[in-house]
Image: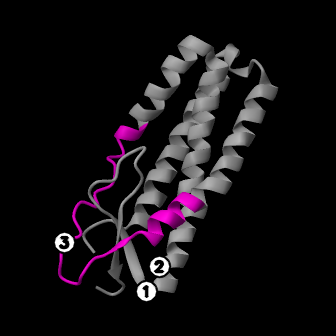
Amino acid sequence: MSVPTYRERLQVEGAALAVLGGLGSAGLLVFVDESTRLPGNTIGQLAAVAVLLAVFGPRFVGRWLDGAHPVLAGTDPGSGEPTPLWHLPLVVLVLTVPIGLVAGWDAGLRVTAGCLLVGVAQALPLARLVARREREQGVVYVRLPGSRLGKGTKLGAIPAGR
């Protein structure tokens, strides 16, 4: 298949986001003393992010899989192009730097570590959820045009083996 599957997108983009979040976190911890301020607050907020990902991640992905549109054999599913990986460092920077400058670098650490958690969730449990559904349904899911941050992901279901 020439279009990356939704599962592949989750794995690659999630792994990249996790690595960037980990590198950003390590950089802050090593080079910015203020990043270690209020460790209990940081741990508590990251635990909350992990719980939200565990509860709502599968719900959102499951809803998007349930709403996938059938894509007929021989038709073009549209743009399944992944987010260019060079966008991800910009996302981490644009989220981290203003927050670090305004709220302190401990808050910046929460952002980078949060990116790590989101990336791991995408690359591992959410990608596995998609793989399980693909096996059960006999389809491969692809992202369709019209997916937007805040509006959700629109998916197409292509019969497996196409």
| Residue name at image x 47 percent, y 48 percent | 16
Question: What secondary structure prevails in the magenta region?
Answer: loop
Query: What's under tag 2, amino acid-wise?
Result: Glu
Applied colour scheme: one colour
Q: Please state, as top left, top right, bottom left or bottom right, where the C terminus lies in the image.
A: bottom left
| Residue name at image x 18 percent, y 82 percent | 74
Front-most of residues 133 and 154: 154
Front-most of residues 75 and 10: 75
Query: What's under tag 3, amino acid-wise?
Result: Asp
Spot occupied by residue 125 in the image (x, y as percentages of width and height): 61, 63
**Which structural element holds mark 2?**
helix
The circle on residue 134 is: 2
Marks 2 & 1, CB-CB < 8 Å contact: yes
Spot occupied by residue 84 in the image (x, y as percentages of width and height): 32, 47
Q: What residue did someone put label 1 on?
A: 138
Spot occupied by residue 147 in the image (x, y as percentages of width and height): 34, 53
Above or below 140: residue 112 = above
Spot occupied by residue 88 in the image (x, y as percentages of width and height): 41, 40
The residues bearing labels 2 and 1 have C-alpha atoms spaced at a distance of 6 Å
**Which structural element holds mark 3?**
loop
From the viewer's perspective, is 105 left or right of 4? right
Above or below 67: residue 16 = above
Stretch in magenta: 59-88
The residues bearing labels 3 and 2 have C-alpha atoms spaced at a distance of 19 Å
- The answer to which quarter of the image holds residue 94 is top left
